[in-house]
Amino acid sequence: MTEATYTVEGMTCAHCVGAVREEVGELAGVREVDVDLESGRVKVTSEAPLTADAVAAAVTEAGYRLVA
């Protein structure tokens, strides 16, 4: 298992957290997605490392932006 933490811009409520969790959670190999609304951090636990592009695309699909 591997863990990676990302910063997401634009989340303001519980609905935002759920949308990001759902989209990132659908990526292949993802086992757990922990979203902290206050800090804007998203911790992803997956079977293998994910590409930043894949995570960014999922976050964008949810309506938010991954901060580099």
Image (cartoon, grey):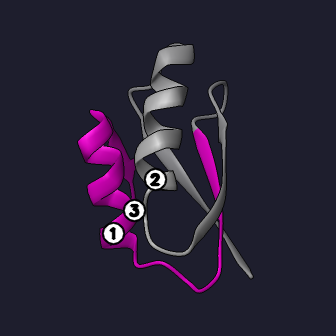
Circle 3: is it few (<14), some (14-19), or many (20+) Cα within 10 Å? some
Taking 34 as reference, is 52 left or right? left
Taking the view exactly as shown, the residue that stands out farthest to the right is 1
Residue 24 is labelled as 2
Given contact means CB atoms under 8 Å apart, are the residues at marks 3 and 2 in contact? Answer: yes
The residue singled out by tag 1 in the image is: 54
Residue occupying image coordinates x 74% and y 82%: 1
Q: CA distance from mark 2 to mark 1?
A: 9 Å
**Corner quadrant of residue 53:** bottom left
Element type where label 3 sits in the image: helix
Looking at the rendering, the stretch of residues picked out in magenta corresponds to 41-68
Q: Amino acid at mark 3?
A: Val
Whether residue 45 is in magenta: the answer is: yes
Residue type at tag 2: Val
Seen in the picture, residue 4 relative to 36 is either above or below; the reply is below
Q: Earlier in the sequence, mark 3 or mark 2?
A: 2
Q: Residue at x 43, y 31 (%)?
A: 19
Mark 1 → mark 3, Cα distance in angstroms: 4 Å
Q: Are marks 1 and 3 in contact (CB under 8 Å)?
A: yes
Q: Is residue 43 above or below residue 37?
A: below
